[in-house]
Image (cartoon, rainbow, N blue to C red):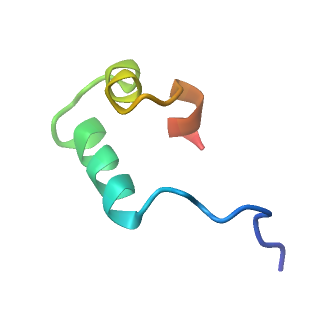
Amino acid sequence: MDFPQNPSKYSAEFKNETIKQLTERRYRVSEVAENLGITRELLYQ
């Protein structure tokens, strides 16, 4: 089994809240990314 070279720097809580913003609150990916200070591409990973 292959493991990522670098462990995730984002907590499970952070990831769950991000998903909530996209699914329950229906924010656009670009809005969420901008609010979090990360790229849209990172959200798709």
Residue 42 as seen in the image, left or right of residue 23: right
Q: Residue at x 54, y 57 (%)?
A: 9
Tell me where residue 13 appears, x and y as whole percent: 31, 62
Q: Is residue 38 above or below residue 15?
A: above
Q: Is residue 38 above or below residue 30?
A: below
Tell me where residue 35 appears, x and y as whole percent: 31, 26
Residue 10 as seen in the image, left or right of residue 32: right
Q: Is residue 35 above or below residue 44?
A: above
* Quadrant assignment, res 8: bottom right
Residue 13 as seen in the image, left or right of residue 3: left
Asked whether 13 or 24 is in front, the reply is 13
Tell me where residue 20 appears, x and y as whole percent: 24, 47
Asked whether 22 or 13 is in front, the reply is 13
Q: Is residue 45 above or below residue 13?
A: above
Q: Residue at x 50, y 37 (%)?
A: 43
Asked whether 8 or 24 is in front, the reply is 8
Residue 2 as seen in the image, left or right of residue 43: right
